[in-house]
Amino acid sequence: MKRKLKNAFVASLTLLAILKSLTMAVMAAETPSELRVGVAPISPPMIFREGGKVVGLEADFAQALGVNLGRQVKFVELRWEDIIDALVNDKIDIIMSSMSVTRARQARIAFSNPYMRIGQMMLIRTEEQGRYGLLLDSLGDKSIGVRKGTTGDVLVQHEFSRAKRKYYRSGDDAAAALRKGRIDLFIDDSSMIWYLAGSYEAKGLTASPMVLSDEVLAWGMRMSDASLQQSVNAFLKRTQDSGEATRLVRQWIPKFH
């Protein structure tokens, strides 16, 4: 009898070990080793290419998130107008590309908690600093450069419907057009406008201090991916509580407060 009980006990332990191994294998299979981060790297200093690499504030956040989740970051470069479709169609896991939270976007994807507050601003020619002032009506008949599908594009359509919109792929393209007089001003996220103002200060461009909107930036995920949403929000809270988030932001955007 004792031998039978002993054999049954050993068999039970063996079965438990097998079940544990199978469970760990299933969990490993269910947890991807990569974190596919969707980016449109045309928004310095948030996310852009430099020296053949994707860099910027969002890139630093992505790498820190990857370490936190134990997943290797893989940047998937996309056109801005394709980035939400790529997420919905499971081609990427998360959007970390200077995306503002809007009601229209919330209808399609879930957002993390906000990590930064921005607004739309204008890049203008230095000699025209006093031309626009605080009278937004003065923008109505201007030729305004924007990036297609951005909140700057939407703002111009809604608030300055009489203005002539011209689309540019990047802030540098718009800055070149502004210098040559092809547009009167360029509207985009305040982070990009301050960056361009610093880059083109010696070439006659500056930032208008007027802020045209109040927005928050966050990271986009599929609505069905509740587990990733929880993990991302937990990571964000830890980095904000520790001060690491503020350090990263100020490293790339010294004017941020």
Image (spheres, rainbow, N blue to C red):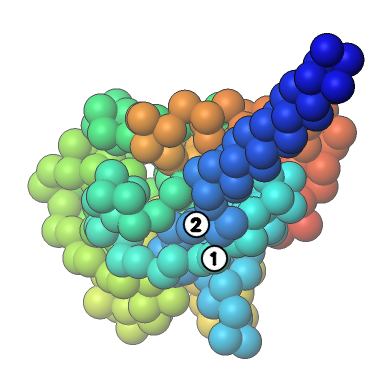
User: Callout 2: 10 Å neighbours few (<14), some, many (20+)?
Assistant: many
Residue flagged by tag 1: what amino acid is it?
Lys
Where on the picture, by quarter, is residue 100?
top left
Where on the picture, by quarter, is residue 201?
bottom right
Please indicate, yes or no, whether residue 101 appears anywhere in the rendered image: no
Say above or below: 192 vs 182. above
Which one is nearer the viewer's eye here, 178 or 222? 222
Instruction: Report the residue at 52% width, 30% height from top.
Output: 227
Circle 2/circle 1 CB separation < 8 Å: yes
Q: Picture coordinates of residue 129 (x, y %)?
A: 48, 58
Give the left or right position of residue 244, taking residue 128 as reference: right
User: Callout 1: 10 Å neighbours few (<14), some, many (20+)?
Assistant: some
Q: Picture coordinates of residue 242 (x, y %)?
A: 86, 33
Please indicate, yes or no, whether residue 99 appears anywhere in the rendered image: yes
Q: Picture coordinates of residue 11 (x, y %)?
A: 73, 29
Q: Tell me the number on the disc at residue 74.
A: 1
Give the left or right position of residue 171, taking residue 118 as reference: left
Instruction: Report the residue at 36% width, 30% height from top.
Output: 224
